[in-house]
Image: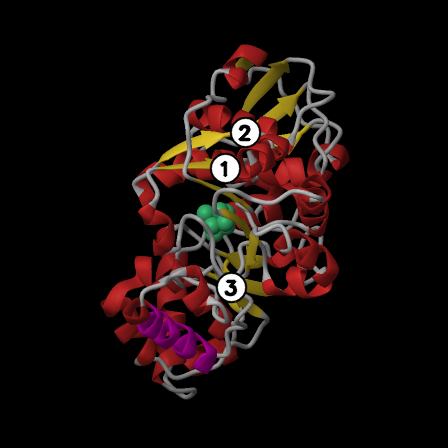
Amino acid sequence: MHLDPLDEQILAGEQGETRQKMLELLVALGKVFGAERLVPIKSAQVSGASYKTIGKYGLAWLVSLDAKAVVPAVLNPIGMPRGRWQEMGVDPGFAENQNAVVAAYEQLGIRLDCTCTPYYLYETRLGDHLAWSESSAVCYANSVIGARTNREGGPSALAAALIGKTPCYGFHLSKNRLPRIVIDVHADTKHWSIADYGALGYHAGKLVGNRIPYFRGISPAPDQLKAIGAAMAATGAVALYHVEDVTPEAKINHYDLAGLEIIPVESADIARLFTEIPVEAVAVGCPHCSPAELGEIARLLAGKTVTKPFYIFASQGVIDQNRQVVETIERTGARVYADTCMVVSPVMEKYSAIMVNSGKALAYVPDMCGALARIGTIEDCVNVATE
Ligand code: F3S
């Protein structure tokens, strides 16, 4: 693997033990996957942020590190909203440990945006090389933006943040970004909601596994693309997909689809995922809400009062840029929380059934929260939260 003189200095320990170990990790990863070189990255997104997932051993490892990020690096959602954890009902012992994790990342120069949608806060462009780790963010970056990132683990994303480079293999190389399977959607999708596209992703992820799907027959908007990718990354291991005439690389390239397996998806495949089970709480914002989604929720909630817990998750940056909208939502009794989400917060474990508008949450809530999950449109979610 080719390394430049600066890399050799780091490997020799001339920039401290942490950077030495981090570069060793990246080089080892590169060797395993056949990378010929490291590639400079524009940004990193680091998972392993909730104390619910990282635990005491992960925290001890973080605290032992001594270096600073050399590229913009954002933290994934943590287990609680930093400024409002008491209000959300987070256990003080958990909050103490979570704050220690956050402080450790801050020491390392990681920005505490705590979001899976860093693309709303920091400009990310077609062709940018990244080291992102949260699966929905990875899928969005690769597919909707046309940036290039592998699905990093927490340690490798952190290592890339501290070194500013990542091994050049996998989705960093054009030859690995070609469609591997075609999905033909046979449905009238003109009025499909974000939830319908999330359900499509939920269904498609199970069919394609880790292959790169090429969709035909749909015209999703950006928030709907976000929903498809997040769900496919959850039920499958999809880190990149293309949509004919929609996603950037599908528009630029003329892919040869001859010989690829074609899987049909019918409207009934999607409709069967929508159930009417009774729920105790409603949670939206998986992935974190865009400004447009917050605006839509505010519009739907206008003049209503919530009758069951209604959680909305977004990044602090998006909340700050949409203060009036957030105030409108919260006047109804719903809560817009930053930094966390329905999957990584332990608070959601107290419910036995949760309604969501996300295919990813539909997949993860049962295992991560121990609750039944029901998917519905955002209109359905507002209706159930206010009935
Ligand atoms: Fe984001 Fe949490 Fe969903 S990290 S994609 S809101 S599970």
Residue 308 vs 278, above or below: the answer is: below
Q: In the rendering, at what x and y percent does residue 179 appear?
A: 58, 29
How packed is label 2: few (under 14 Cα within 10 Å), some, or many (20 or more)?
many
Where is residue 299, by image quadrant?
Answer: top right
Which quadrant is the C terminus positioned in? top right
Please tell me whether mark 3 sits on a helix, a strand or a loop.
Answer: loop
**Residue drawn at the location 60% of the way across and 45% of the way down:** 305
Quadrant of the image containing the N terminus = bottom left
Tell me whether the residue at label 2 lies in contact with that at label 1, contact meaning CB atoms closer than 8 angstroms: yes
Q: What secondary structure is marked by label 2?
A: loop
Q: Which residues are magenta?
A: 95-108
Q: What is the three-letter code of the residue carrying label 1?
A: Val
Q: Residue furthest left?
A: 57
Q: Which residue is mark 2?
A: 376
Residue appearing at x 57%, y 47% in the figure? 173
Q: Is residue 27 visible?
A: no
Image check: 114 left or right of 252? Answer: left
Secondary-structure class at tag 1: strand
Within 10 Å of disc 3 (Cα), the crowding (few <14, some 14-19, many 20+) is: many
In-front residue for pair 217/380:
380
Relative side of 76 to 347, left or right? right
Task: Give the residue number, with chain letter if any, for mark 1.
Answer: 356
* Residue 135 vertical placement versus 196 (above, below): below
User: Upstream in the sequence, badge 2 or badge 3?
Assistant: 3
Tell me: is circle 3 under 8 Å from ligand 1.
no
Q: Quadrant of residue 372?
A: top left
For label 2, being within 8 Å of ligand 1 is answered no
